[in-house]
Amino acid sequence: MNTKEIVSGHPSTMGDDVQLNTTTLIRHAARTHGEREIVYRTAGGGWDRYNYAEAYDRIKRGANALRSLGVGPATRVGIIDWNSRRHFELYWAIPGLAAVMVQLNLRLGPEDLSYVIKDSDTSLICVDESLLPLAEAVAPSMPSVTTWIIMSDKPMSEITTTLPNAHHYEELLAASEADIHWPEIDEHSAYSACYTTGTTGRPKGVFYSHRAIYLHSYAIAANVGMTLDDCTMLITPMFHGQAWGLPQAAALMANKIVLPGRYMAEDTGPLTDALIDEGVTITNGAPVIFIPMLQYIETLEVKPDLSNLRMLSGATEPPLTLMRGFENLTGAETVHAYGATETTPLVTMNRYKASVRARLTPAELLDLKRKQGLPVSGVEIRLVDGSDQDVQWDGVTQGEICVRGPWVTRGYHNMLAEDAKDRFVDGYWRSGDVGTIDPDGYLKVTDRIKDVIKSGGEWISSIDMENLLLNHPNIAEAAVVGLPHPKWQERPFVLVVPRSNATVDIADIRSHLSSAFAAWQLPEAMTIVTEIPRTSVGKFDKKTIRSQHASVYAGSATSE
């Protein structure tokens, strides 16, 4: 689908035939920085640690074990696990055999999870013992899965399961050799696969090449400023989007790594304590995780010094209260980033250019952090209108964000080109997001095309409205959707989760929003809830919200 002409120049004398493989990253880290620690959460909730050399020994044994079970080039091997040390080991063992690591989202329902397993043609699955009920729920409808590997600290004799042809990970490792001859793999081969988790349609498969993740690792490291002195904690689930590519980037730069295992947004205390105790300087996550972490820090008598911490924040725009809170209390920097399953995922990262740092006030710089950031080197962005014509980068004119680059997908697994054509334009992937780019080059996502509120012929940004609401002192969470209106086509509707013991009403909401929105843009209705529906990756499930509240404005034909 490359629409650009490729011109050949004079041949080089370089080793262009040396393939970019994921194995190179972990092999170098273990060989040159073998003493570097990897800290991991145990099944009992405690913490333990080993180092790169010890991890690499287990990775090689794991690869030999998989090979003994028939895993080889193009075999699809699924993983159902938390952010554990075994998951980390499989990140290298599976693709090292030229097999494909299929990231199985354990938050998917059984029907969608079964679909992903079938569509990817996964034949072997590694599953953590705590997730056996999920595996056992889909196994009867998965005849193509011929082998299961159970990962547990318990011996197999103490594990009861209905999974057929089940093996024990630790027993397989103990019986395997530590020496291995890694194949040199065609860098265009898939090393991993991840499926989109949108709220419409079936999940769509994206298969990532060794070349793509290798180059992506350098882009992450360069743009976040990784050094050999950093400590990276993987908060974003490793079962979705390569944990944003941080496992590979951290190995590239031989970072100390912290693997938090299983955690919950309702109890981020242990997660936050580990971040502080282990001296984490780079981490990733969504505001839905970072907000309770900040609230936990607010309860600490002595606030930690996190002035070296860079928190990569994605999924939704981080509210100013979150960014300001971490900076004021701990010195930590929130780094807003943008991407998608289809983009590996890095597209933009919000770091200050020297020119804007010199020109803007501290308040203006903080407001700039709300934008998704600058395109990283190697990625090209277009903003196109409804006729697929490029729009101006003036910070005002909106267009659909379209992306092209060496780690951006050119299609979907098992999807006919005819069916996928609407997702691409001139070789660029259509994101489905609406945005602007200012003259400094900073991207601002203003909404999803499907979520922008179309009222009286004008557009209202649900994202901007949500983020302003999160600055309200009595609001913990807020979601905004457009609901059908008999006169105005759509009107904004608000779901609000108040802070503990706080109250809020529609008049308060409208007054708060009036600082940035015109009177005609303000919502006429809201509902107080204790929880807002979310998708499997923590985003607001706006499809469900619209369905549940579709009739709110049904009798408002005379509303102005």
Image: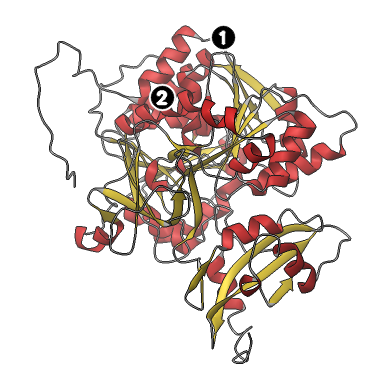
Residue 272 pos. (x, y %): 74, 34
Dot 1: within a 10 Å radius of its alpha carbon, few (fewer than 14), some, or many (20 or more) residues?
some
Name which quarter of the figure residue 462 lies in.
bottom right
Residue where numbered disc 2 is placed: 218
**Which color scheme is applied?**
secondary structure
Q: Secondary structure at mark 1?
A: loop
Residue 10 pos. (x, y %): 9, 17
In this picture, is 182 found above or below 3?
A: above
Task: Check contact, mark 2 vs mark 1: CB within 8 A.
Answer: no
On the question of residue 137 being in view, the answer is yes
For badge 2, the amino acid type reads Tyr
Q: Earlier in the sequence, mark 2 or mark 1?
A: 1
Q: Which disc is residue 35 wearing?
A: 1
Q: Secondary structure at mark 2?
A: helix
- The answer to whether 359 appears left or right of 120 in the picture is right
Report the front residue among 15 and 125.
15
For badge 1, the amino acid type reads Glu
Dot 2: within a 10 Å radius of its alpha carbon, few (fewer than 14), some, or many (20 or more) residues?
some
In this picture, is 133 found above or below 179?
A: below
- Report the Cα–Cα distance between label 2 and label 1: 22 Å
Q: Which is closer to the viewer, label 2 or label 1?
A: 2
Residue 370 pos. (x, y %): 59, 45
In this picture, is 431 found above or below 81?
A: below
